[in-house]
């Protein structure tokens, strides 16, 4: 469920027409619905109520401070993967006691920074990393809490770039290696095992991979307990899929109905790390038509947002629904919606049937709240888009549009 709808012949975000927002703030423009963010968090939180849990929002999906503040106020924890994300969460008012730190390549500086803020735990991905964390914790005269990320070798049936729980992926440790490391880690004086973590992939649209992986994880937790390693936390990662096109992903209630029966058997506090589910359909990218170009084989709609603003179509051949902010009457035509960047991969949508368009019209690229702005770049020296948060009939700029001066400010070559 999201709060975008067509009313009075145009597309609204909550109580504001996207056309008016685009006119006021310019394009390309990311727009987020605060009501949708809260709704998604609360639906999942309520559905998971039968197990003691914390939802740790995956900051990487959308790290705007206003988004983080919204979730912090709702009581969320946070899943971070860098010192930069930790800075953001702290600035947005997130509680360090609910922050978990993942990632295969944490540097010594990042580990020290997280230890100083006493985060809930590190998710470790290798023995070398655990030894490094133990040494840094010793130097800080503290004890680091950690979970080992296990790789359950379950196929999440998603795009191969965002599958993470197969044995050929760089993530986690197989159960046997993880077991040996838990036992060896008992001797570490500055690192204490508090839980186990996994994350099998992203944009997973059925419950079966989750159930399969969580079932394996539960057996592993019980096996460890029998071996004298009692874990307080079980972190099952994120990955819940959303509707971009014609997918039928589980709702929050359906997801909970599938996983709660397994999780309930564990005497542990359960953590979830959803990113996309929380923010994906809460955001859109509004772009303006610049030119209509017809060649012998194609009709192109050239817009002012490119792969630097939203890279998902280029990188994953991802589908994002595209519709005019104010549809014109007339027969639909099949067009490619492309950006201004000098690459043929620079498209937002291919072979889309759209109503007639004119230069100056606005197009709405749906489901852009997750991995949209967060993956934006300055390729082609293009300033990144502004971001606006809508709540009811109020809008506020939560990130101003970058300027060329912003882009050049860090360069020292002249
Ligand atoms: N936890 C861990 C350890 C992760 O690696 C990820 C995502 C998440 C949680 C959140 O996953 P989510 O609930 O959002 O699926 N850029 C790609 C997605 C990359 C996901 C990376 N890890 C995309 O645009 O589809």
Image: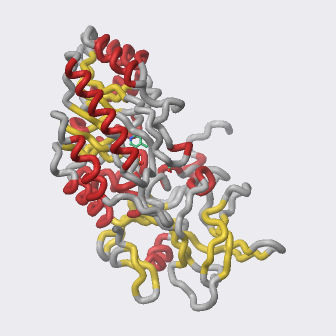
> Where is residue 21 shown, x and y percent of the image?
45, 74
Q: Is residue 383 visible?
A: no
- Which residue in the rendered view is the most extreme toward the right? 296
Q: Quadrant of residue 147?
A: top left
Q: Nearer the viewer, residue 50 or 3?
A: 50
> Where is residue 228 shown, x and y percent of the image?
20, 16
- Which residue in the rendered view is the most extreme toward the bottom? 329
Q: How is the image coloured?
A: secondary structure
- Ligand 1's image quarter is top left
> Where is residue 108 shown, x and y percent of the image?
41, 21
Is 357 rendered above or below residue 97?
below
Residue ID at (66%, 73%) = 290
Residue ID at (29%, 57%) = 254
Q: Quadrant of the N terminus?
A: bottom left
221 vs 310, left or right, is left
Residue ID at (23%, 39%) = 270
Q: Nearer the viewer, residue 300 or 268?
A: 268
Q: Quadrant of residue 131?
A: top left
14 vs 19, left or right, is left
Q: Nearer the viewer, residue 30 or 162?
A: 162
Q: Is residue 280 visible?
A: yes
Q: Quadrant of residue 129?
A: top left
Q: Quadrant of the C terminus?
A: top right
How many numbered circles are shown? 0
> Where is residue 349 shown, x and y percent of the image?
62, 65
Is 55 rendered above or below residue 248?
above
351 vs 236, left or right, is right
Q: Nearer the viewer, residue 235 or 58?
A: 235
Residue ID at (84%, 74%) = 296
Is 207 rendered above or below residue 349?
above
């Amino acid at each position: 469920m999201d709060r975008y709808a067509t009313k009075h012949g145009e597309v609204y975000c909550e109580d504001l027409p996207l056309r008016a927002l685009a006119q006021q703030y310019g394009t390309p423009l990311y727009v987020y619905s605060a009501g949708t963010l809260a709704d998604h968090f609360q639906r999942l939180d309520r559905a998971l109520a039968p197990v003691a849990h914390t939802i740790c929002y995956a900051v990487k999906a959308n790290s705007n401070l206003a988004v983080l503040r919204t979730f912090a106020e709702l009581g969320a924890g946070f899943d971070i993967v860098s010192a930069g994300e930790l800075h953001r969460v702290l600035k947005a008012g997130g509680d360090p006691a609910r922050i978990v730190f993942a990632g295969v390549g944490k540097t010594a500086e990042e580990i020290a920074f997280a230890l100083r803020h006493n985060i809930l735990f590190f998710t470790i991905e290798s023995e070398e990393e655990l030894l490094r964390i133990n040494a840094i914790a010793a130097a800080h005269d503290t004890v680091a809490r950690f979970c080992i990320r296990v790789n359950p070798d379950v196929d999440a049936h998603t795009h191969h770039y965002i599958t993470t729980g197969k044995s050929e992926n760089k993530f986690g440790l197989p159960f046997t290696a993880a077991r040996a490391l838990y036992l060896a880690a008992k001797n570490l004086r500055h690192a204490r095992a508090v839980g186990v973590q996994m994350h099998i992939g992203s944009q997973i649209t059925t419950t079966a991979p989750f159930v399969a992986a969580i079932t394996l994880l539960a057996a592993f937790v019980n096996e460890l307990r029998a071996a004298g390693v009692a874990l307080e936390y079980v972190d099952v990662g994120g990955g819940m899929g959303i509707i971009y096109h014609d997918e039928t992903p589980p709702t929050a209630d359906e997801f909970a109905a599938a996983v709660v029966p397994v999780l309930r058997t564990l005497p542990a506090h359960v953590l979830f790390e959803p990113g996309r589910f929380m923010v994906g359909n809460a955001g859109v990218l509004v772009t303006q038509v610049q030119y209509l170009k017809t060649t012998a084989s194609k009709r192109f709609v050239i817009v002012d947002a490119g792969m630097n603003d939203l890279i998902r179509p280029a990188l994953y051949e991802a589908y994002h629904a595209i519709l005019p902010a104010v549809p014109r009457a007339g027969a639909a035509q099949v067009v490619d919606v492309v950006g201004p960047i000098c690459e043929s991969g620079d498209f937002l949508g291919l072979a889309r049937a759209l109503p007639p368009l004119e230069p100056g019209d606005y197009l709405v690229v749906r489901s852009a709240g997750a991995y949209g702005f967060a993956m934006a770049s300055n390729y082609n020296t293009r300033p990144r888009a502004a971001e606006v948060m809508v709540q009811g009939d109020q809008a506020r700029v939560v990130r101003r549009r970058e300027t060329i001066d912003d882009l050049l400010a860090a360069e020292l070559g002249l």
